[in-house]
Each structure stands twice: as C-alpha cells, then as structure tokens.
C-alpha cells in the first residue's frame, strides 16, 4: 500500500512505544488488516499485515 492511497487513515501510537514521542510505531485499522508505520517517517509507505498475522506477531512479541 502506498501512503498516498490512504490519506484519511487514523493512525495511533502503540502503547509500547517510547514516551518521548520520537521513536514510535503507529498503527491504523484497515478492512481486515492493520497498517504499521514508523512515526519518524509518516510519509513512507506503511507495512500492511492481515489482522490474524498482526495478532500473531503482537502476541509473539509480548512473550519476549
């Protein structure tokens, strides 16, 4: 997905991002998927993961 294809997405910062605000992962809800981007590069293309893949990734990261 190109960032220019989704100008109206509502991005939110992950709860696990640093509190300083400059080193964050941002997430956006998509139809059946989740967009993931780096807050330092909001104009860059987001990584788009199918919702089940994102859930599996998030659970795997919590274990570590």
Image: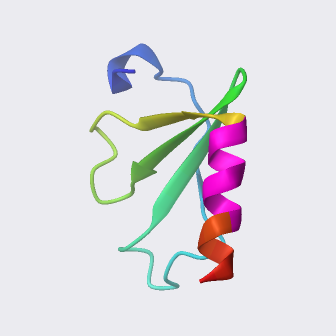
45 and 50: which is toward the camera: 50
Kindly identify the residue that appears in the image at 49 percent across and 82 percent down: 18
Q: State how the image is colored.
A: rainbow
Residue 8 higher or lower than 19, as above or below: above
Q: Provide residue 61's location: percent of width, then percent of height.
A: 59, 71
Q: Position of residue 8 (x, y in %)?
A: 55, 24
Q: Is residue 3 magenta?
A: no
Q: Residue 12, relative to residue 6: is it above or below? A: below
Q: Residue 50's quadrant in the figure?
A: top right
- Quarter of the image with the C terminus in it: bottom right
Q: Nearer the viewer, residue 30 or 60?
A: 60
Taking the view exactly as shown, the residue that stands out farthest to the top is: 5
Residue drawn at x 71%, y 50% is 55
Q: Is residue 35 left or right of residue 31?
A: left
- Please report the residue visible at 71 percent of the width from the left and 20 percent of the height from the top: 31
Q: Please identify the quadrant where the N terminus is shown.
A: top left
Percent position of residue 16, x then y: 60, 76
Which span is picked out in magenta? 52-59
Between residues 53 and 10, which one lies in front from this camera angle? 53
Tell whether position 55 is magenta. yes
Magenta span: predominant SS is: helix
Left-right relation of 18 to 11: left
Residue 59: image x %, image y %?
A: 71, 65
Count all numbered tags in the image, as a single digit: 0
**Quarter where residue 4 is shown:** top left
């Amino acid at each position: 997905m190109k960032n220019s294809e989704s100008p109206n997405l509502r991005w939110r910062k992950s709860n696990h991002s640093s509190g300083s605000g400059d080193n964050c992962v941002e997430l956006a809800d998509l139809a059946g998927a989740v967009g993931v981007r780096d807050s330092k590069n909001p104009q860059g293309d987001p990584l788009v993961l199918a919702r089940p893949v994102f859930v599996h990734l998030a659970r795997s990261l919590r274990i570590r």
